[in-house]
Image (cartoon, rainbow, N blue to C red):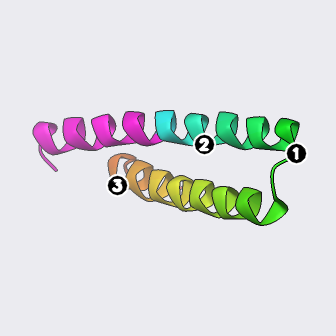
Amino acid sequence: MSDQDQADIRLAVARLKQEHMDFDAAIQAMIQVGCDQLRIQRMKKKKLVIKDKLIELEDKITPDIIA
């Protein structure tokens, strides 16, 4: 993988981490306000999808080490 590809992936990871934190803050605010549980669950699912994407991208830039 080229250095440019790794830089692009690292940038995408940083963006996804920020988006993940934003979803977390939004979910906490919804809980505090007493929002509908169904809406909260949907937000949590979206947050989980972001986390899955994060893990996938981080795996791409982490070298495989044979133990």
Q: Are marks 3 and 1 in contact (CB under 8 Å)?
A: no
Q: Nearer the viewer, residue 56 or 18?
A: 18
Q: At which x and y percent is residue 51? A: 56, 53
**Quarter of the picture holding the C terminus:** bottom right
Taking the image as shown, residue 49 lies to the left or right of residue 65, namely right
The type of residue carrying mark 2 is: Phe
Q: Main secondary structure of the magenta part?
A: helix
The type of residue carrying mark 1 is: Gly
Q: Which residue is mark 2?
A: 23
Q: Which residue is mark 3?
A: 60
User: Can you see residue 46?
Assistant: yes
Q: Is residue 45 above or below residue 35?
A: below
The image quadrant of residue 46 is: bottom right
Q: At which x and y percent is residue 40? A: 75, 56
Q: Which residue is mark 1?
A: 34
Magenta segment boundaries in residue numbering = 1-16
- Residue shown at 38% from the left, 53% from the top: 57
Sequence-wise, the earlier of marks 2 and 1 is 2
- Residue shown at 16% from the left, 50% from the top: 1
Q: Nearer the viewer, residue 54 or 4?
A: 54
The local secondary structure at tag 2 comes to helix
- Residue shown at 60% from the left, 42% from the top: 23
Q: Which mark is residue 59?
A: none
